[in-house]
């Protein structure tokens, strides 16, 4: 079926664990596919975490978190297979890119800018790929009819009896997001506006759409709020007889321990006014939290761990001396055979 290949939010669910976004990456949750009950936790939050790795393990800073933050997850895995010499050589190239003003030293702001660039690289790459796939017009814009036809197979309005009627809710929801992304209201999207359409959690003016879509997904009784049970059903699934639910650590009622923790999170932290349900503002604070700047904290951590002379600046020599902090290296016998030699 056409929309399963091109529908952006379906693709986002498959990429949900990217940094985030996901993350980002952190990418946005699937809004139309039915969830299969499972004991695996579903992530709705678009928190600006820099890695799926825990920042601390066993009371110690986790180096894998640093590697993901500095390189991005895929590149971090590549660097893990390099020898120390090759890791240092490629890190030196990256350091030159980070040093925007070419003064020979890296300051915390330049490091923060690089980390933010790495986290946004997926979004930019994904937008570029989808933009080309949808074949924009001669004026480098994309109109709604073209997008709808490419995504759903037909450009006609989804009226009863029309080929698109079975996708009516999907089309109307996409159109609403499209109109919000169409900043100048000309009926077409530029590449920048299309990026906002694909990744609305990254654009301040689009975040109400993310909240609205999340509410529509989870609010099964249609009261305009998310109850505790709706919250748990969404992240876990509502079929407690599923065989997979027997796996992992459970309490006396057969509920996974992490679900119990999520109940406590809902009651003690997410439900700010303690009325037993989440309103739109509480939903926004849950899925798009803004109270912590991960990139600033990580940049400060890397500088603190690397700055030997404590002058607040990092030389290339200081960074290469601590190469394992930035990029890591397994230095295995088979590492050279797995090395990717294309330029970073």
Image (cartoon, helix red, strand yellow):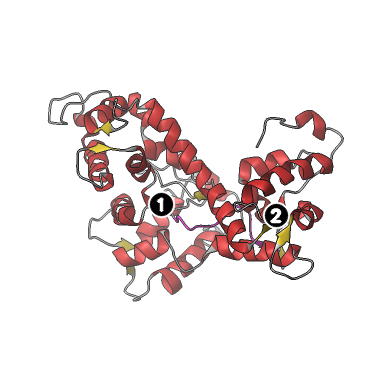
Span highlighted in magenta in the image: 45-58
Q: In this view, does 304 lie to the left or right of 139?
A: right
The overriding secondary structure of the stretch rendered in magenta is loop
- Residue placed at 38% from the left, 37% from the top? 8
Residue 79 versus residue 108: which sits nearer the camera?
Answer: 108
Residue 307 versus residue 124: which sits nearer the camera?
Answer: 307
Q: What element carries label 1?
A: helix
- Viewer-nearest of discs 1 and 2: 2
**Quarter residue 84 falls in:** top right
* Residue 276 at x, y percent in the picture: 34, 71
Mark 2 nearby-residue class (10 Å; few <14, some 14–19, many ≥20): few
**Residue 291: within the magenta?**
no
Query: Where residue 104 is drawn, which disc sits there?
Result: 2
* Residue 14 at x, y percent in the picture: 48, 39
Q: Is residue 159 left or right of residue 199?
A: left
Mark 1 nearby-residue class (10 Å; few <14, some 14–19, many ≥20): many
Q: Can residue 11 be seen in this view?
A: yes
Q: What element carries label 2?
A: loop
Which residue is outermost to the right?
333
C-beta proximity under 8 Å, tags 1 and 2: no
Q: Is residue 251 visible?
A: no
- Residue placed at 70% from the left, 43% from the top? 93
> Which residue does the numbered mark 1 point to in the structure image?
202
All told, the count of numbered labels is 2
């Amino acid at each position: 079926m056409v929309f399963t290949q091109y529908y952006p939010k379906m693709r986002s669910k498959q990429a949900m664990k990217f940094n985030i976004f996901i993350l980002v990456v952190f990418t946005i949750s699937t809004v139309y596919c039915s969830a299969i009950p499972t004991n695996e936790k579903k992530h709705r939050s678009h928190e600006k975490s820099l890695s799926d790795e825990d920042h601390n393990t066993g009371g110690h800073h986790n180096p894998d978190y640093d590697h993901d933050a500095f390189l991005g997850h895929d590149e971090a895995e590549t660097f893990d297979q390099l020898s120390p010499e090759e890791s240092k050589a490629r890190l030196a190239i990256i350091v030159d890119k980070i040093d925007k003003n070419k003064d020979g030293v890296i300051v915390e702001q330049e490091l923060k800018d690089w980390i933010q660039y790495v986290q946004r690289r997926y979004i930019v790459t994904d937008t570029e790929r989808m933009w080309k796939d949808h074949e924009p017009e001669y004026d480098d814009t994309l109109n709604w009819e073209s997008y709808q036809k490419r995504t759903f197979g037909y450009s006609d309005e989804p009226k009863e009896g029309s080929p698109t009627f079975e996708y009516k809710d999907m089309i109307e929801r996409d159109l609403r997001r499209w109109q919000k992304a169409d900043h100048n209201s000309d009926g077409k999207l530029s590449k920048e506006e299309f990026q906002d359409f694909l990744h609305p959690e990254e654009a301040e003016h689009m975040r109400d759409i993310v909240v609205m879509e999340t509410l529509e997904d989870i609010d099964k009784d249609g009261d305009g709020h998310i109850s505790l049970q709706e919250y748990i059903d969404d992240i876990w699934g509502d079929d407690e007889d599923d065989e997979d639910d027997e796996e992992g650590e459970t309490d006396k009622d057969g509920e996974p321990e992490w679900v119990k923790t999520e109940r406590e999170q809902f009651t003690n932290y997410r439900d700010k006014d303690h009325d037993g349900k989440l309103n739109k503002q509480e939903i926004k604070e849950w899925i798009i939290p803004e109270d912590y700047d991960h990139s600033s904290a990580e940049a400060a951590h890397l500088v603190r761990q690397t700055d030997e002379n404590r002058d607040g600046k990092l030389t290339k020599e200081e960074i290469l001396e601590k190469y394992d902090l930035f990029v890591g290296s397994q230095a295995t016998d088979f590492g050279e055979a797995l090395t990717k030699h294309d330029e970073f």
